[in-house]
Image (cartoon, rainbow, N blue to C red):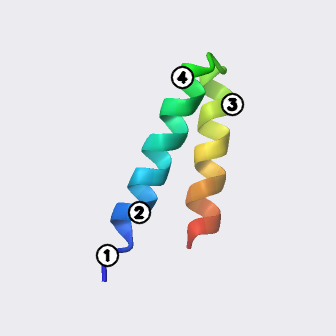
């Protein structure tokens, strides 16, 4: 059972969207942190 792969893809997709929309790196990190916390 692969749990790491979907999480990584979700984080990569989130980062890609934030960068495309020119969001602050701090905002991007905050959202990624929430994804990591609530994924478990």
What is the spatial separation of the Cα atoms under label 2 and label 3, in whole angstroms? Answer: 21 Å
What is the spatial separation of the Cα atoms under label 1 and label 4, in whole angstroms? Answer: 27 Å
What residue is disc 4 on?
19
Say if 21 sits above or below 14 in the image.
above
Q: Give the residue at x 62% y 20%.
A: 21
Q: Looking at the image, is mark 1 or mark 4 earlier in the sequence?
A: 1
- Residue contact at pointers 3 and 1, CB within 8 angstroms: no
Q: Looking at the image, is mark 3 or mark 1 earlier in the sequence?
A: 1
Residue 20 vs residue 40, the one in the foreground? 20
What is the spatial separation of the Cα atoms under label 4 and label 3, in whole angstroms? Answer: 10 Å
- Camera-nearest label, 4 or 3: 4
What is the spatial separation of the Cα atoms under label 3 and label 1, in whole angstroms? Answer: 28 Å
Drawn side of residue 29 relative to residue 27, left or right: left
What residue is disc 2 on?
6
What residue is disc 3 on?
27
The furthest residue to the bottom: 1
Locate residue 36, reporting x and y percent. Answer: 56, 58
Q: Quadrant of residue 18?
A: top right
Q: Give the residue at x 48% y 52%.
A: 10
What residue is disc 1 on?
2
Locate residue 32, reporting x and y percent. Answer: 58, 46
The furthest residue to the top: 22
Question: Around disc 1, counting alpha carbons within 10 Å, would you say few (fewer than 14), some (14 to 19), or many (20 or more)?
Answer: few
What is the spatial separation of the Cα atoms under label 1 and label 2, in whole angstroms? Answer: 8 Å
Question: Around disc 4, counting alpha carbons within 10 Å, would you say few (fewer than 14), some (14 to 19), or many (20 or more)?
Answer: few
Q: Secondary structure at mark 4?
A: helix
Q: Give the residue at x 67% y 40%.
A: 30
Q: Give the residue at x 56% y 31%.
A: 17
Question: Around disc 2, counting alpha carbons within 10 Å, would you say few (fewer than 14), some (14 to 19), or many (20 or more)?
Answer: few
């Amino acid at each position: 059972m692969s749990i790491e792969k979907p999480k990584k893809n979700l984080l990569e997709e989130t980062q890609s969207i934030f960068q495309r929309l020119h969001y602050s790196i701090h905002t991007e990190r905050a959202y990624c942190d929430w994804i990591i916390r609530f994924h478990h």
